[in-house]
Image (cartoon, rainbow, N blue to C red):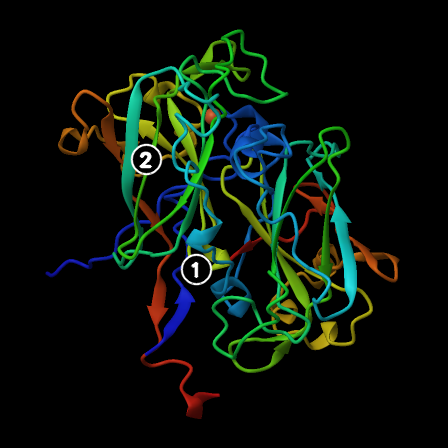
């Protein structure tokens, strides 16, 4: 028999407690190597769309917020176009789509200044409700956790082709942010427990 | 033919989330099953970074934090390799970020309490972006092993942490590189979160004497494989939509 020529993905290892050194060195006091930490700024004065703040904490199974998590987000621009690799066209040049934030050393809270994304199509052409993709790493997390944040009171949620595939619909609310102010959305992530966030193998 | 969905991750090759010998994982691992989905544009697209963002010393940890005229202490090494996808194709333009302890096993970090001293000329971070063939290289010093609070006498083998971006957010990967011949590797509870010995072997960089610079720095080779993508020969055709 012939052999398949695929090779294996490198196995993941935890980011560990010192992930800041490599990913947000200025945040952890290593200054003078990079001008600024990557992913610290997603928007500028010219960015189109509604400005929002997305903030939250990551909680462990005891209910304690992680003080050493690193969170990354990826989202479409206000028109629903991704800034890189989107075959449908060019996104807003003044929007990066990608953000990275470390939890505060004392409180564990992280936040992003961004814009509300537009809707993006599912592979079959139906539209997915506006959402932000999350990737969470930390000490004790062996492989980065993938989830999505959706916006509350969005009429598209009910027919969203991704959300409607979820068997336990009573868990879908773990993917929906809370509106704190009209421009501030809180998205707490629970690694375990009755409110455990839905994480995807995707 | 265009790029289709990402290959599914082999969750038996990767470490599981719940690995009790690595104690911190016990309260930080999801208890419910991950929900399996096929990728969409949200996972298939991702941030890319241009070479113009790099500083001259970003890939030189011996110099990038050192005082003028000084150098980091330790065994000088070059780490080089390629970033590939699971189809074996080089991934150009992939951003790699790396971080490590100094030669004595000490990190430059507020939460670090090991008694080994800081090196005033070593910061411990670097980054580079792969070239057209997926190749990369950086210069550093060999990090030391260090003890960590888990069991009463657990030590990390010498290692370098890597954060890797491909072309897709769904390819995001953080991993660690170990060094050929290190007897600490099989003792480490973090290494042992990986159950398949072949998967552990994929994280061990061999000494590469051919690329060693005589009288200067030894070389280690470390290739990094990211998730591949299916071709879309027979899917997503117009009539199917
Ligand atoms: Fe480490």
Foreground pick, A132 / B77: B77
Query: Could you say which disc has been placed on residue B85 in the image?
Result: none
The quarter of the rendered structure image containing the N terminus of chain B is: bottom left
Label 2: how many Cα within 10 Å (few below 14, some 14–19, many 20+): many
**Of all residues shown, which one is farthest toward the bottom?**
B239
On screen, residue B76 above or below B15: above
What residue lies at 42% left-to-right and 36% top-to-bottom?
B57
The quadrant holding residue B97 is top left
Q: Which subunit holds the residue at mark 2? A: B
Residue A22 horizontal side relative to residue B27, left or right? left
Q: Which subunit holds the residue at mark 1? A: B
Residue B106 at x, y = what percent? 49, 16
SS for dot 1: loop
**Of all residues shown, which one is farthest toward the right?**
A181
Residue indicated by mark 1: B167
What residue lies at 38% left-to-right and 15% top-to-bottom?
B73
Residue indicated by mark 2: B203
Q: Is residue B97 among the parts visible in the rendering?
A: yes
Residue B241 horizontal side relative to residue A49, left or right? left
On screen, residue B212 above or below B31: above
Instruction: Tell me, yes or no, whether dots 2 and 1 are on the same chain.
Output: yes
Residue B170 horizontal side relative to residue A79, left or right? left
Residue A80 at x, y = what percent? 63, 74
Foreground pick, A174 / A92: A92
**Of all residues shown, which one is farthest toward the left?**
A1
Label 1: how many Cα within 10 Å (few below 14, some 14–19, many 20+): many
On screen, residue A5 above or below A108: below
Residue A21 at x, y = what percent? 54, 31
């Amino acid at each position: 028999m012939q052999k398949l020529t695929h090779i294996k993905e490198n196995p993941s290892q935890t980011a560990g407690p010192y992930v800041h050194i490599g990913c947000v060195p200025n945040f952890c006091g290593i200054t003078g190597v990079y001008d600024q930490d990557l992913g610290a700024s997603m928007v500028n004065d010219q960015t189109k769309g509604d400005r929002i703040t997305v903030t939250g904490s990551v909680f462990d199974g005891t209910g304690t917020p992680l003080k050493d998590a690193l969170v990354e987000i990826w989202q479409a621009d206000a028109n629903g176009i991704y800034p890189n690799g989107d075959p449908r066209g060019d996104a807003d040049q003044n929007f990066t789509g990608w953000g990275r934030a470390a939890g505060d050393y004392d409180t564990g809270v992280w936040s992003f200044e961004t814009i509300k994304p537009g809707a993006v199509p599912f592979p079959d052409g139906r539209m997915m409700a506006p959402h932000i993709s999350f990737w969470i790493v930390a000490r004790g997390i062996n492989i980065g956790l993938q989830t999505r944040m959706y916006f509350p009171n969005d009429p598209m949620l009910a027919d969203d082709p991704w959300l409607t595939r979820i068997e336990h619909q009573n868990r879908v609310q773990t993917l929906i942010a809370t509106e704190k102010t009209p421009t501030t959305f809180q998205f707490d992530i629970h690694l375990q427990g009755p409110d455990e966030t839905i994480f995807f193998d995707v | 033919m265009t790029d289709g969905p990402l290959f599914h991750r082999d969750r038996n090759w990767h470490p599981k989330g719940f690995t009790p010998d690595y104690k911190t994982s016990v309260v930080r691992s999801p208890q419910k099953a991950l929900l399996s989905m096929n990728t969409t544009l949200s996972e298939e697209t991702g941030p890319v970074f241009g070479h113009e963002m790099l500083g001259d010393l970003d890939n030189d940890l011996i110099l990038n934090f050192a005082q003028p005229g000084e150098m980091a202490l330790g065994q000088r090494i070059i780490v080089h390799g390629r970033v590939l996808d699971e189809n074996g194709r080089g991934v150009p333009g992939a951003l790699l970020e790396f971080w490590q302890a100094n030669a004595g096993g000490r990190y430059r970090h507020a939460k670090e309490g090991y008694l080994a001293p800081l090196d005033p000329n070593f910061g411990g971070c670097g980054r580079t972006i792969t070239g057209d063939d997926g190749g990369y290289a950086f210069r550093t010093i060999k990090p030391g092993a260090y003890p960590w609070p888990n069991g009463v006498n657990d030590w990390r083998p010498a290692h370098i942490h890597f954060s890797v971006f491909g072309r897709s957010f769904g390819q995001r990967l953080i991993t660690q590189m170990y060094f050929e011949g290190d007897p600490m590797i099989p003792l480490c509870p973090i290494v042992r979160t990986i159950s398949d010995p072949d998967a552990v072997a994929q994280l061990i960089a061999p000494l590469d004497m051919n690329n060693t610079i005589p009288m200067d720095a030894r070389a280690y080779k470390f290739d990094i494989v990211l998730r591949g993508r299916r071709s879309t020969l027979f899917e997503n055709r117009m009539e199917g939509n």
